[in-house]
Image (spheres, helix red, strand yellow):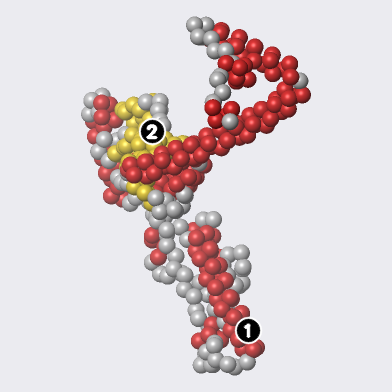
């Protein structure tokens, strides 16, 4: 919508026409004298036309006094109407007021300087080509300012472009992906454990014009924001989550950084958690805990093995007791195993009953 159309609609509203699509109903919008020179329009709201203003500003009893249920409900309705009025007014201002727009152009002084610069280029031709012709690489773009104003047409490049040496300044922006290390951050996790975490961030500039005009140093700002975001995200996690959910944390950081740097013309492509360093005492405690857990599991496994072995031996004893020959076979099998492993030593078990005939009886036993 042009400036003339905005002024015509405001004039109609001053005459008394109510158009909800342009501004909130019931409000007088006046244009201040001299405000159009900078493209800024002043909005004045009369208290008489504001919905519910008479109820709030009249000498009637204030809300909160016990004047009956109907008065309380009426006051709440007036308060909601006032809040809605403020929201509608702010929305109308954002949609219809363009701050910083200069319809008058750069002015006669800028026109004279520009003309003088072009004449100087023509007078010193072809020597002036050394100062007027510039080249940017395929991965670069040039943002040009003429007399401090951003030149129309956006960034220039890649290839050759021309500038006016006296009145033009330009800045090259690299569009390639840049990576940097986030310095180690001492972070207190949600379960009160201090850890040092560092990360790697990959970003690139997707809009050179915004990267130059909206932020002083987009690279330094992105680095500071990455360090702050790392602390904020990890501060909401437990130590176990920090150690096991690195991919989720990286994705959360990337989304947060990308959303925050979009007004700067920067696109954060990837974030990776590089290292998580724990205090030495905490490492020893965790190692002792893991060792104790392994020993406990080993004891449980050994006990389960002994239990299974005892059940198997009991079943074997029951089977051998049913057949006397099985015990002799088992005896011979054991001898075979011993002779195969250590053939220099053979042990023969000798029954005690055989030796009773060779033992002399004691005198006490005779009596």
The x and y percentages for residue 86 are 52, 71
What residue is at 56 percent from the left and 7 percent from the top? 340
Work out whether mark 1 precedes mark 2 in sequence or the reverse, and give the earlier one: 1
Query: Considering depth in this image, is 76 or 4 the residue closer to the camera?
Result: 76
Query: Considering depth in this image, is 15 or 223 the residue closer to the camera?
Result: 223
- Residue 178 is tagged as 2
Residue 82 sits in quarter: bottom right
Q: CA distance from mark 1 to mark 2?
A: 59 Å
What residue is at 48 percent from the left and 45 percent from the top? 240
> Does 68 sit above or below residue 168?
below
> Does 360 sit above or below residue 50?
above
What residue is at 37 percent from the left and 41 percent from the top? 283
The x and y percentages for residue 280 are 33, 42
Query: Considering depth in this image, is 93 or 80 the residue closer to the camera?
Result: 80
In the rendered image, is residue 151 in sight?
Answer: no
The x and y percentages for residue 27 are 55, 75
Give the total number of marks visible in the rendering.
Answer: 2
Query: Does residue 222 appear left or right of residue 115 in this picture?
Result: right
Mark 2 element type: strand
- Residue 73 is tagged as 1
Mark 1 element type: helix
């Amino acid at each position: 919508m042009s400036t003339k159309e905005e002024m015509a609609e405001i004039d109609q509203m001053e005459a008394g026409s109510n158009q909800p699509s342009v501004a909130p109903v019931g409000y007088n919008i006046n244009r201040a004298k001299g405000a159009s020179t900078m493209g800024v329009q002043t909005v004045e709201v009369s208290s008489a036309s504001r919905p519910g203003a008479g109820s709030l500003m009249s000498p009637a009893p204030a809300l909160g006094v016990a004047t009956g249920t109907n008065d309380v409900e009426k006051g709440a309705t007036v308060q909601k109407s006032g809040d809605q009025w403020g929201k509608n007014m702010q929305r109308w201002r954002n949609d219809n007021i363009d701050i910083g727009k200069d319809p008058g152009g750069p002015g006669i002084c800028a026109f004279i300087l520009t003309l003088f610069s072009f004449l100087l280029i023509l007078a010193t031709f072809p020597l002036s080509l050394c100062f007027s012709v510039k080249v940017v690489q395929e991965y670069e773009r040039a943002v040009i300012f003429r007399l401090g104003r951003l030149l129309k047409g956006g960034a220039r490049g890649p290839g050759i472009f021309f500038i006016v040496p006296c009145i033009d300044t330009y800045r090259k922006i690299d569009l390639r992906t840049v990576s940097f290390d986030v310095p180690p951050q001492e972070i207190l996790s949600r379960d009160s454990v201090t850890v040092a975490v560092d990360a790697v961030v990959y970003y690139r500039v997707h809009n050179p014009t915004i990267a130059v005009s909206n932020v002083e140093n987009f690279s330094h700002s992105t680095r500071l924001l990455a360090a702050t975001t790392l602390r904020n995200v990890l501060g909401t996690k437990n130590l176990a989550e920090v150690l096991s959910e690195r991919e989720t944390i990286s994705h959360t950081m990337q989304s947060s950084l990308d959303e925050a740097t979009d007004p700067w013309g920067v696109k954060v492509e990837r974030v990776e958690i590089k290292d998580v360093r724990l205090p030495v005492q905490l490492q020893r405690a965790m190692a002792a805990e893991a060792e104790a857990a392994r020993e406990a599991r080993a004891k449980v496994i050994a006990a389960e093995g002994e239990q299974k072995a005892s059940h198997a031996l009991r079943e074997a004893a029951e089977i051998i007791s049913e057949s006397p020959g099985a015990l002799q076979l088992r005896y011979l099998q054991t001898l075979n195993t011993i002779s195969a492993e250590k053939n220099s030593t053979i042990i023969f078990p000798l029954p005690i009953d055989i030796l009773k005939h060779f033992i002399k009886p004691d005198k006490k036993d005779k009596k």
